[in-house]
Each structure stands twice: as C-alpha cells, then as structure tokens.
Amino acid sequence: MSTYNALKYNVPFASAGGLIALSTQTASSSASVSFTSGIDSTYSEYLFIFNNIHPATDGAFFQFNLSTDSGSNYNVTKTSTAFRNFHNEADSQNLLDYLDGLDLAQSTDFQTLNENQGNADDECLSGYLNLFEPSSSVFVKHYLAKVEGYQLNNASNGQNTAGYGNTTSAINAVQFKMSSGNIDAGTIQMFGVVK
C-alpha cells in the first residue's frame, strides 16, 4: 500500500493525514465497478477518485449506490442535494443551478454524480467521492462528491452532490455504474484517509 499526502494533491476533506491506496479498478466495457472489500472500521473516511470515466452510451448519467450486505444489494435509502455549474464551448449558455431532478428524498435509487455525459472519443468525466464513517453503528453515512464532465452537447458540467445514507448499519460495499450502457473505460481508486 502506498501513502499519499492529501495536501499535495489538494483533495478536500482529506487533509488531516495521508491517503492510503487500498484498491484500483479499471473499467473496460464494464457494466459496473464495485468495491466489496476493504471498507471497514480501519478508516473513518474513504475517498474514491474517478479518472477519465468514459461511457459507452451518449448522454448516460454516472451514478453510485451503497450496500450493507457486502454487495448482494445496492439499495441503501438516501437523501441528498445537488447543484451544477455549466458552460458550453460556444459561450452561448452558462448556468449555476440546483438540480431538483437529481436529488433524492428517502430513495433507494442510485445517486447521480454527473448527468448527460458525452461518449465521443475525447469525452470523459473525472472527480471524487468522500464517504464518512461507513462503519458507524450509531449515525447515518454522509457523502460528498464533485465531478466534472464533458457533456454530450460540448459543454463543461461540474456537479456537486451531498447527502447521507439513512442507515445505522455499516456500509461495506460501494458500486459505480452508468444509468444506461457500460463504463467503456476509466479507473476508480479507493483510498483510506489517515486521521
């Protein structure tokens, strides 16, 4: 396992100590990418970094969900909020808006982290997800995410998502997928955050 200095990489919410690399998965026409081991009480925070995630289907949404049964089911009830900053290449449209269609209210659906992702050869998304205290048997499980994507309509789309898994059961698996089609390419890294 390698140790990374969080400050060097300017990773928010991971600056108290270093990052311990736990697992890296590379998608290749994959229906989903799942982390089913290594999420336990060893660390109070886990960080997932997405690098150049490229969908097979144009306009797909990048999503995740949580599991309390080691990945048998990804259906944790979640409540969340989301907003985006958007600017197209033609400089004809720019937005900063709340995404009421992508927030969740006591839903077991997959949480969207970025919408309308393009699948042209040069289009991809990158970003991160922080998951806090997944092994707590007392509190809900908070998460924060920031994802930047090249949308299908030639635009920069930055989405900020925050919420909580409304369960006091331990979260021990996380799955990422597209709303339709496969993850054609890209890597997802999982880190434990040292206090």
Image (cartoon, helix red, strand yellow):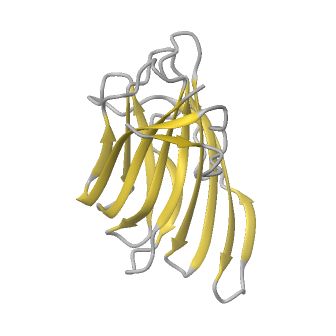
- The x, y position of residue 5, in whole percent, is 58, 43
Q: Nearer the viewer, residue 129 or 65?
A: 129
Which residue is the extreme one toward the bottom? 90
* 115 in relation to 34, above or below: below
Say which quadrant the N terminus sits in: top left
* 157 in relation to 131, above or below: below
* 128 in relation to 190, above or below: below
Tell me the quarter of the picture where residue 130 sits: top right
Say which quadrant the C terminus sits in: top right
Instruction: Say whether residue 78 is left or right of residue 11.
Output: left
Q: Residue at x 44, y 29 (%)?
A: 76
- The x, y position of residue 73, in whole percent, is 31, 30
Instruction: Say whether residue 62 is left or right of residue 113.
Output: left
Q: Residue at x 73, y 75 (%)?
A: 94
- The x, y position of residue 162, in whole percent, is 63, 41
Q: Nearer the viewer, residue 182 or 129?
A: 129
- The x, y position of residue 187, in whole percent, is 37, 56
